[in-house]
Amino acid sequence: TLKLSAIITYTASGTTGLRAARERPQVPIVALSPILNTARRLSLLWGTHCVVSPDASDLDDMVDRACRIAFDEGFGKPGDRVIITAGVPLRTPGSTNMLRIA
């Protein structure tokens, strides 16, 4: 069992955040979306905190941005572990296929 401070999902359509919230994890879900309407919709889900954020340019930028946003929003502190889910290649809705521990 990993000691996590948050689950971070990159989502354009909202499906990744919905799937994460459906499992009712014990840690908060931080959903990052470039689309305001998607973020508003996801804010109604159980345990989900939404942030409107532009898409990352590459995987390293995605990890750095996800950790920084989560920590800035009060979900842990630098050095805490988080799980990041996203679709690779980036900017392809419906392609969630990556899980990274950071």
Image (tube, rainbow, N blue to C red):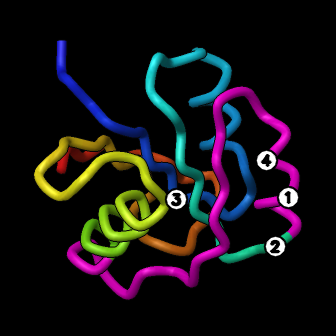
Q: Which mark is residue 10?
A: 3
Q: Which residue is mark 4?
A: 43
User: What amino acid does circle 2 point to?
Assistant: Leu
Q: Is residue 89 above or below residue 21?
A: below
The residues bearing labels 1 and 2 have C-alpha atoms spaced at a distance of 6 Å
Residue at 52% x, 80% y is 55
Residue contact between numbered discs 1 and 2, judged by CB atoms under 8 Å = yes
Q: Amino acid at mark 4?
A: Ser
Q: Residue drawn at (49%, 60%), measured in percent from left and top?
A: 73
Does the segment drawn in magenta span residue 46?
A: yes
Identify the element where label 2 is drawn: helix
Q: Dot 4, crowdedness within 10 Å: few (<14), some or many (≥20)? A: some
Q: Is residue 53 left or right of residue 56?
A: right
Secondary structure category for the residue under label 3: strand
Q: Which residue position is annotated with label 1?
A: 40
Q: Is residue 24 above or below residue 33?
A: above
How far apart are the two marked residues, 1 and 3, measured between alpha carbons? Answer: 14 Å
Q: Which residue corresponds to the image point at 45% horizontal and 72% vertical from the top-left?
A: 90
Question: Which residue is situated farthest in the left direction here?
Answer: 79
Q: Residue at x 68, y 64 (%)?
A: 12
According to the picture, the residue beneath numbered tag 2 turns out to be 36
x then y, percent, for residue 76: 31, 46
Q: Given contact means CB atoms under 8 Å apart, are the residues at marks 4 and 3 in contact?
A: no
Viewer-side label of 2, 4: 4
